[in-house]
Structures are given as structure tokens and as C-alpha cells.
Image: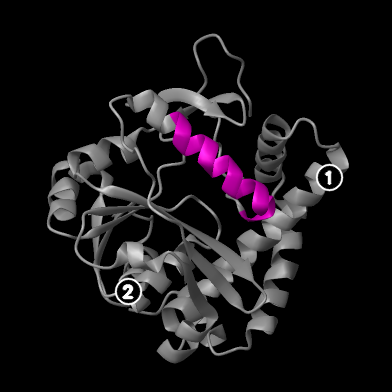
Amino acid sequence: MMPHPGILFMRLIAPLPLSWLRGLGALLGRFLYTLAAPRRKVVLANLALCFPQRPLAERENVARQSFVCFAQAFLDRAWLWHGKPEMVRRRLCLTGATSELHGQAPTIIFAPHFYGLDAGATALSQQVERRFTTIYTPQPGRAVDAWIKNGRRRFGQVRLFYRADGLKPIVAALRTGEVLYLLPDMNFGPQESIFVPFYGVPAATVPSLSRLARLGRAKVVPVITRMTTTGYEVQVHPAWSHFPTEDLEADTARMNRTLQDYIDTMPAQYYWVHKRFKTRPPGAPAVY
């Protein structure tokens, strides 16, 4: 079988200096911002809902930066998944309350959709002696699907669960000491979602963080990955106290409020290209 041209390209650029890759990503991001009009409109609509107090020019600037970060993070998969291990470790700075990940206590990592989420997962699997699991969505195309799965399992011990597998195997893994890398801050449709505020706007949100923490008797440890000029800073935050509670809706609202605080520190690095408000409350007008 001939190698997929895109994957071959990523292998070829993996050894390049990071500054070169980031420069290429900046060019690609500006190109996408200009040509990908439907997705640009999604980003601008999200920013208008979440930051209505900011001038339009400021929101447009964040949108342009967001496309650049999107492209740079995508190209960074080249060295994350194909670069020499020592280079990968050098570019991934794991900081913060890393002791929260020691031992075998059931642990869920709250990993919001910042563009560096693959870098964060790589840093943890490479630098922390734990078994990790995450939920994986199959990709179209066998070659690309295999490439992503192999990249995410490159270091350490990582298991991928499919969403269709349900909660039972995930809960069982938590109770045996495997750390769940969970990304629950996207719109997965109305099934099992509840509406809680996100920047003051009702957002369909899956309450999986609270539900899995309760079922797995697990603590929740936020891990926020920030793109830097030298790679990524992967910051481990202290485990949340008094979480989960008996109130699924209150727990999920707390998740969104805390996520807002993280986003406010680096708004251009959040995954605004996603249609976060696609699912609307009954009677509410469509956003996109």
C-alpha cells in the first residue's frame, strides 16, 4: 500500500526546527482564515456570543490568531508523533501539581479543547508512569485513522475507548487505576446533554465529567496545555474539591465556569472552530 501523502509529509517535516514549523503554520493559518469562509463564520459567531462586549475588530483578531494556532498545532503532530523522543520531551514542559498523578488513585483528567490537547496527552503518557485511557472517535480513511491512533499511543501505556463502547469499560478502567484523559466540552448533540451556561449562553453539554467521577469514585484533575514559542507548557492543576456532588447540573455548570477562566488566559488557543452552540434550547434561534 502506498503511504498516505499527508502522513508522509508529516514524517518529512518532523525533524525541522520548531521555528520553521511554527512559521509554516502561521502561513497556513492565515490562508485558511481567508479561504475557509464557512468555518471562519463559525469562529466569529462563537466569539460574538461569548465575548459580545469586545469590539468586532478585537474578535476578528482573535479569530485570525485562532486559525494560526489551529494550523500550528496540527503541524506539531509531526514531531509529537514522529520526532525523536528526547526532542519531544524537551519541547513538552510538564508543570504544576504533578503529584496529583502519582500513585494509583482513580483519576480523571479534565482536558478542555485547547489546540494543544495532543501535546498534553503526549507529555503525560511520555513523562508520567501511569496507564492512560481516552475516548476516541474513528476518523474517515483507514490510513489517517491508524496514524492518529498510533500517534496517541506512541508513548507509555494508552488505551483508546470508542464512544459506542459505553461507560462500563471506562468505569472499570478507572477503578483499576487507569487515568482517563477526558474532553467533555464539545457539543455532542441533544442525547444525554443538558443545557448549562457557557459564557452566559445556554450550551448543550454532556455531564460525563461528573457522572464518570461519581461512578469511578475518581478525583478530577484539570490539565491545561498552552502553546509556547519553545513547544508547550502542560500545567497540572490541583484536584477539584467537593466534586462530584449529587447535583449533575451544578457540577456541569461548574465545569463550564472553570473552563471560561482557562479560556480567558489564552482565548486564541481554544477550539472555536467547533459549532459549540449547534444544539439550541427549544424555541431558540439557530446560531450558525
Q: Is residue 59 magenta?
A: no
Q: Is residue 82 visible?
A: yes
Residue 60, percent from left and from top: 80, 45
The residue lying at 65 percent from left, 62 percent from top is 69
State which region is magenta: 253-269
Which residue is located at x 41 percent, y 32 percent?
252
Instruction: Please say whether residue 190 is visible from this viewpoint.
Output: no
Residue at 75% across, 69% down: 27
Q: Is residue 84 left or right of residue 106?
A: right
Q: Nearer the viewer, residue 265 or 192?
A: 265
Amino acid type of the residue tagged 1 in the rendering: Glu
**What mark, if any, has residue 277 been given in the picture?**
none
- C-alpha gap between disc 2 and disc 1: 39 Å
* Residue type of the residue flagged with mark 2: Val
Label 1 belongs to which residue?
58
Q: Earlier in the sequence, mark 2 or mark 1?
A: 1
Which residue is at a point 23% across and 42% down the rendered structure image? 164
**Residue 261 in magenta stretch:** yes
Q: Nearer the viewer, residue 144 or 128?
A: 128
Identify the residue at the far front of this view: 241
Locate the C terminus and report the quarter of the image it occupies. Answer: top right
Give the side of residue 208 with respect to residue 17, left or right.
left
